[in-house]
Amino acid sequence: MKLARIVIVAALAALPAWLSGQSLDPKAFTLFAQPPDVWPTYNGDYSGRRYSSLTQINASNINSLAIAWMYRITGIGPQRGVGEPTIKSTPLMVNGILYFTIPDHVFAINARTGEPIWQYDWDDRGGHLVGQRGVAMYRDWLYFLGPDGWFISLNAKDGKERWRKKIADEKRQYFTTTAALVVKNHIIVGVGGDAMDVRGYLDARDPETGELQWRWWSTPEKMGDSGSDTWPSQDAMDHGGGMTWMPGTYDPELNLIYWGTGNANPVFAGQSRKGANLWTASIVALNPDTGKLVWYFQGSPHDTHDWDNVETPVLFNATINGQPRKLLAQAARCGYFFVLDRTNGKNLVSKGFVGVNWSKGIDEKGQPIPDPKKEPQIDGALVNTPGGGGTNWPPPSYDPDTELFYVNARKGYSIGYVYDTSDKPEGYAGGGGGLWAQSLLEAIDVRTGNIKWSHEYNDLGAGGAPGNAGILTTAGKLLVTGGSGSSLVVYDPADGKILWHFRLPRGVSNGPSTWVLDGQQYLIVGAGDTLYAFTLVNRG
């Protein structure tokens, strides 16, 4: 592969001027309104709304949408434990270049033509290749996580490595699949890992050197610290979990980052960690300059179902009871839809968007109350939330025009089993048998949590199934996502009417994105090992 790298990099010398200087203007990082000719972060802007103000492609001309180009990953073959390469990253688009990833690989391609520019290959030493969400960019530099805990910086122009820093130990079963988030002069990166009962954490790294600026642990450090009263012992906290394996969001005005944390450990056996187990399965608000916790909201207290609470904490503003509010919404894996005041974490809405009979109700903070009878049992415990949760990592969207929150969801049942009933279980210590029956797209009213409309998929693998499509909404009155039968589907976000669909060889596997180049709007989706660019054509 080294020879191929030399050939590609050598070709850079012949590139036109618009490709020669790759630098991301910090002004591209905004809360709500990114410039039309850039997609600078995993979610497009800091809010996580995945909403674009572009209107060139719209409901009136959607039937003129056609493929502009395709880029297929070749020469890699099946990846360890996961099979053929699958694009789960949302590409960054900066100055006419797309940057995207799969595990162990970073690609730069021409956004106008799909032609390759350079490719970076990482030789991992372990870790899970379940997915890779993408790169982050600061000035002329890219940031990428290998699956084995290495944090790597590349030159955006040619893909050459600047430095690498070890941030997690794969020998302790940590792994790293997230896209980093650039906040001022901090690169925020999270970690994953359940198998060996390790603690989760979130790092801020120096963009120039990769050195650690601060680390926030998702369980308390020692008994007596804040939050330790939700754990029975030091040993339980030390095995606590709370991984941070999906990108968060950021409010520049409040100077707060919002991050989801994963399930507590041991995963399915909770007898050694009685209590709520803070700050696992939570949304946390941190000061990005210090890493200090400002507030938290726990979506799945004492989680025993492997329901990571890492789903995107989406930021938006709306008027509630006549008062303008700064809000945060999350459709959580546990099946609840939450709306919070993002200034202080106060709960405004808690309502199931799928079945949630694992909960006995809502407490005074708006947090679900787990039902002990629904915890995994030796002979199984049936709950009306699917084994993988009511949704998973594929990103949702919020449309400020409809004031609806859109999520690919799953309704169904699962049976939770516990295998290790000892006082100190380890690892997963159990499992969940998924029996889901229906995948669907839901549009949720953010003021009430009520479902305004939904669209049922015809096959179980569509929509909210793990590894499938995220959602994009636009001011052109479009909602874009994956659908049944490996289709790319465009809906009317107001009522769910299908406006357009296009059959692909494999299902949409990432979050769609959109931007403008040379006055032309493009729609980008990943489906399996191929990236597709769509634009309008003149059909005469």
Image (cartoon, rainbow, N blue to C red):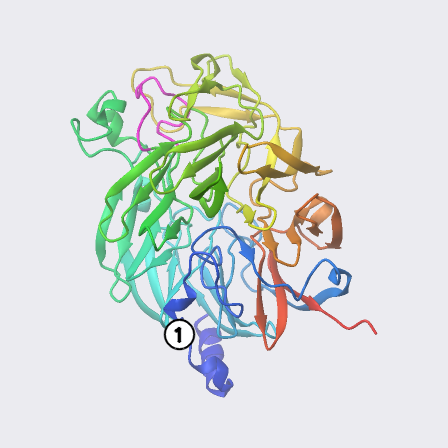
Q: Is residue 297 left or right of residue 76?
A: left
What is the number of callouts on the image? 1
Could you tell me what secondary structure mostly forms the magenta stretch? loop
Q: Amino acid at mark 1?
A: Ser
Q: Is residue 187 magenta?
A: no
Residue 188 visible (yes or no): yes
Check the picture and name the quadrant holding the C terminus: bottom right
Q: Is residue 6 above or below residue 302?
A: below
- Residue 201 place in picture, x, y as percent: 29, 43
**Neighbours of disc 1 within 10 Å: few (<14), some (14-19), many (20+):** some
Q: Position of residue 134 (x, y in %)?
A: 46, 57
Picture coordinates of residue 448, whole percent (x, y): 54, 32
Which percent across, then down, holds residue 468?
59, 46
Residue pictured at 51% horizontal, 15% vertical: 380
The residue furthest right is 540
- Of residues 436 and 183, the one drawn nearer to the viewer in this rendering: 183
Residue 81 vs residue 145, the one in the foreground: 145
Range of magenta residues: 263-279
Q: Does the stretch in magenta take in 276?
A: yes
Residue drawn where x is 44% and y is 58% of the image: 104
Residue under numbered circle 1: 23
Please say if 368 is above or below 80. Answer: above
For residue 496, side relative to residue 371 (left or right)? right
Considering the numbered disc 1 on the image, is that residue within a helix, a strand or a loop?
loop
Q: Residue furthest front?
A: 322
Query: Does residue 167 show up?
Result: no
Q: Nearer the viewer, residue 338 or 213?
A: 338
Position above or below: 138 against 472: below
